[in-house]
Every structure is written in structure tokens, then in C-alpha cells.
Image: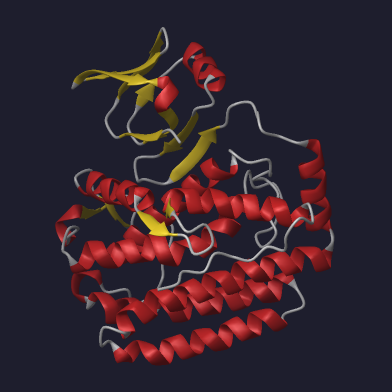
């Protein structure tokens, strides 16, 4: 597995023979293309068609973010893993209401079970106020299994997540990172800014991992497949947000690695990570993705990034009728 490159400064991206060059005020940086899987570009960069052709030839994805850290889009090299049989099977499952609902329920119940695991970690350490929220999440999980339509299932997922977010202040202590309520586009306080930024990172990471399988990220099961560019990465990311994104947020705040001074208000309204705060969060995010856990079935250590790709492979097996999909559930 190659590396993920984060481009935070402005400058020029270009090719020199078989090397990526990043040239800016800080000088030139040479990056071997064969060890690069994707580039996340936050700075203002110039590039040309020759560089994009170079990325396509080497299967390097480019993800672009705007000044506020919002995901804008991806340069998606010509598909190299596509399979007509898999795409056809995926489309059949999406168009069949029963088959689609079966997979969508797995995403929602898997996400709720991992929300519970995130809270149980702190409950076992004496935060017993979380127990009532964990019980409510169990009720929502049971409701999700009973739903007969996607819109109703999405409603249950939304209510479960609202309930889950009430636990954040109990874990972080609130203060300058008090949640109050979830707000998006723009986030109205620091904790919402942190959630929105890291959720975007989770969606992009999941997209990059799906791209390395035969399934198509444009065909989702929980999130509607419509004119949106991608939806399957949103589905799969639901399972991993509690155990990757939210646990990272709790760790960053409880260790005071990210503080109020790392955020600022923008002229268009809303609170966002500052240019000094963004590298701190991205460094922690990359470390989190590369950290490993012992996989219960494989009996070996697997990184969180690999777990996401394995989830995509499980979807592929399910739609090909090889093995029924079971969402990843954290054990602790």
C-alpha cells in the first residue's frame, strides 16, 4: 500500500521524469510516484494536463479541498479495476428494494453498534452517565432492523446519531468545545468544525479504498444513488466514523493536542480549523489510519485503512453471492 501525501502549502505540482515535484516558497520537494497512492490538496496549486496524465498512468488520485477545508472533488484516474460483472451485480442489488434494504440495514446497525463501542470505552472508565445513551442506541439498533423502507431507515440513523452526539460533552467535558447540537455548512462551533473536517477525511479515505476494488463508488445502498458523484463511500464511512473519527476527536481534546486557539471564525460565517490547527489534525488522522488492531478472523494486525478496504471487498463478495455481508464491529 502506497502513501498518502497531504499538500498544505501553495505552489506548483509537476512531473520530472518519474517523480512528483512540489515547488513552492519552501523550496522543491521530490516525491517518488511509485510509493504514492493519493494526494490531498489543501493549498492553492497549479498543475497541467501532463501532470494529470502522469497521475492517471500511475493510478494516483488527487483530492481537492477549498480554503475552509471542505472537500471539493477528486481527480479520479481512468478506472483500472472495473468489472462489468461486479457493476451489473451491484446495480441489480441497488434496484431490488429488498436486496438494497438488507445491505442498508447492515450499514446502519453496524454504525450504531460502533457508536455504542465508542461510548462503552468511556463508560468502563467510570463515566456512567453514558449508560442511558448506550441503552437508547440499542433501541435504535433494534428499530433499524424492523424498518421496511430506506427513508424510514435513514430517519432512524439520523435520530440515533443525534442521540449519540449528546454524549460528546460528557466525554470531552464541554467547555470551549461544547457540542450543544450538530451543525454543518457552516459549523457553528469548534467541536462541529472538527467533526465536519474529519468526517470529510473519512469519506475521502473510504473513496480511495473503494477505488482499489471492483465495486463502483457511485452506486450506494443507504445513501441515494442519484446525481451525486459518489454515494457508496458515504455508506461504508458510517461504520467507521465512530471508531476512527470520533475516537480521534476525543483523544485530541482530552490530551489538549487541539485547542481553542486552533480555530477561527470566517467572514462567510461559521467556525473552521485554522491553518495552524489543520496540520495537527491531519498528522493525528494519518497516524490513526496507519495504527493497527488484531483482526479477530485473520489473527494478524491490520491497519484501520486496510479495514476500510476489506469492508469494500466484503460488499463485493455479498453482491456476488459469495458471502453475506456483516459490517465490521469493534470489539472494545
Q: Residue at x 76, y 74 (%)?
A: 149
Q: Please count the marks in the image.
A: 0
Tell me if I can see residue 189 in this picture: no
Q: Is residue 236 left or right of residue 147?
A: left
Please name whichever residue, 11 or 296, is drawn nearer the observer in this view of the structure. Answer: 296
Q: Residue 18's spot in the image, x, y percent?
A: 42, 12
Q: Residue 11's spot in the image, x, y percent?
A: 30, 21
Answer with the quarter of the image where residue 221 lies. Answer: bottom right
Q: Is residue 265 left or right of residue 64?
A: left
The vertical placement of 228 against 299, above or below, is above
Answer with the quarter of the image where residue 126 lies. Answer: bottom left
Q: In this view, does 207 lie to the left or right of 223?
A: left
The vertical placement of 160 against 90, above or below, is below
Image quadrant containing the C terminus: bottom left
Q: In this view, does 321 lie to the left or right of 116?
A: right
Tell me if I can see residue 77 in this picture: yes
Q: Residue 60's spot in the image, x, y percent?
A: 49, 27
Q: Residue at x 50, y 11 (%)?
A: 50
Residue sitting at the far top: 17
The vertical placement of 199 against 82, above or below, is below
Q: Which residue is drawn at 71% across and 53% down?
A: 317
Q: Residue 6's spot in the image, x, y percent?
A: 34, 35
Image quadrant containing the N terminus: top left
Amino acid at each position: 500500500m502506497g502513501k498518502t501525501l497531504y499538500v498544505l502549502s501553495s505552489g506548483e505540482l509537476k512531473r520530472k521524469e518519474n517523480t512528483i515535484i512540489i515547488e513552492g516558497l519552501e523550496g522543491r520537494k521530490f516525491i517518488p510516484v511509485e510509493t504514492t497512492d493519493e494526494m490531498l490538496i489543501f493549498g492553492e496549486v497549479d498543475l497541467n494536463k501532463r501532470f494529470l496524465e502522469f497521475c492517471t498512468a500511475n493510478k494516483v488520485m488527487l483530492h481537492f479541498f477549498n480554503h475552509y477545508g471542505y472537500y471539493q472533488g477528486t481527480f479520479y484516474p481512468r478506472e483500472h479495476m472495473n468489472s462489468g460483472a461486479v457493476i451489473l451485480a451491484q446495480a441489480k442489488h441497488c434496484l431490488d428494494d429488498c436486496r438494497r434494504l438488507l445491505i442498508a440495514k447492515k450499514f446502519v446497525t453496524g454504525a450504531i453498534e460502533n457508536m455504542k463501542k465508542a461510548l462503552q470505552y468511556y463508560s468502563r472508565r467510570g463515566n456512567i452517565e453514558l449508560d442511558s445513551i448506550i441503552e437508547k442506541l440499542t433501541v435504535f439498533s433494534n428499530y433499524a432492523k424492523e424498518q421496511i423502507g430506506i427513508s424510514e431507515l435513514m430517519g432512524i440513523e439520523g435520530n440515533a446519531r443525534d442521540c449519540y452526539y449528546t454524549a460528546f460533552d460528557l466525554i470531552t467535558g464541554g467547555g470551549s468545545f461544547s457540542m450543544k447540537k450538530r451543525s454543518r455548512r457552516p459549523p457553528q462551533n469548534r467541536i462541529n468544525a472538527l467533526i465536519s473536517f474529519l468526517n470529510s477525511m473519512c469519506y475521502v479515505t473510504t473513496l480511495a479504498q473503494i477505488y482499489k476494488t471492483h465495486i463502483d463508488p457511485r452506486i450506494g445502498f443507504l445513501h441515494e444513488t442519484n446525481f451525486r458523484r459518489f454515494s457508496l463511500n458515504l455508506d461504508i464511512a458510517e461504520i467507521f466514523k465512530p471508531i476512527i473519527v470520533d475516537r480521534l476527536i476525543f483523544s485530541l481534546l482530552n490530551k489538549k493536542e487541539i485547542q481553542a486557539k486552533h480555530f477561527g471564525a470566517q467572514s462567510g460565517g461559521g467556525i473552521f480549523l485554522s491553518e495552524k490547527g489543520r496540520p495537527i489534525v491531519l498528522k493525528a488522522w494519518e497516524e490513526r489510519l496507519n495504527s493497527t488492531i488484531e483482526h479477530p478472523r485473520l489473527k494478524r494486525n491490520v491497519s484501520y485503512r486496510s479495514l476500510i478496504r476489506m469492508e469494500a471487498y466484503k460488499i463485493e463478495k455479498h453482491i456476488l453471492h459469495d458471502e453475506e455481508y456483516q459490517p465490521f464491529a469493534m470489539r472494545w
